[in-house]
Amino acid sequence: MRFDNSEVILEAVIQGADVVQLPKFVAAKAIAPGDLQPILQAYATQVGLPIAVLYPQKRYLSAKVRVFVEFMRELVAALKRDDVVD
């Protein structure tokens, strides 16, 4: 099966589809209550998925871009703090 949505992949795996590799922040929702069991942890990547925000280098950024960049910084920091799955 092939999907481009991590929530759909997560649901398919919970229903017994197969083995999957998902980001920790997605898988943690199913691991915590016991719906999924981590396997092959010795082969897990340590780097994680890269997150990048690209925007034109300007002296004065629009308010929308500035707010979005700050939102992403806070989101990434929160994901690092709430890292439930080791």
Image (cartoon, rainbow, N blue to C red):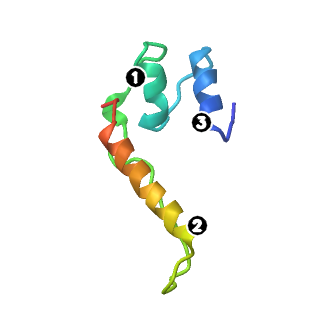
Residue kind at label 3, given as amino acid type: Ser
Residue linked to disc 2 = 64
Left or right, residue 75 beside residue 6: left
Seen in the picture, residue 16 relative to 76 is either above or below; the reply is above
- Residue at screen point 53% across, 29% down: 20
SS at circle 1: loop
Mark 2 or mark 1: which comes first in sequence? 1
Q: Are marks 2 and 1 in contact (CB under 8 Å)?
A: no
Q: Quadrant of the C terminus?
A: top left
Q: Quadrant of the N terminus?
A: top right
Residue linked to disc 3 = 6
Given residues 7 and 3, the one toward you in this image is 7
Residue linked to disc 1 = 38
SS at circle 3: helix
Coordinates of residue 10 in the picture (x, y in percent): 57, 27
Alpha carbon distance from label 2 to label 1? 39 Å
Coordinates of residue 79 in the picture (x, y in percent): 38, 42
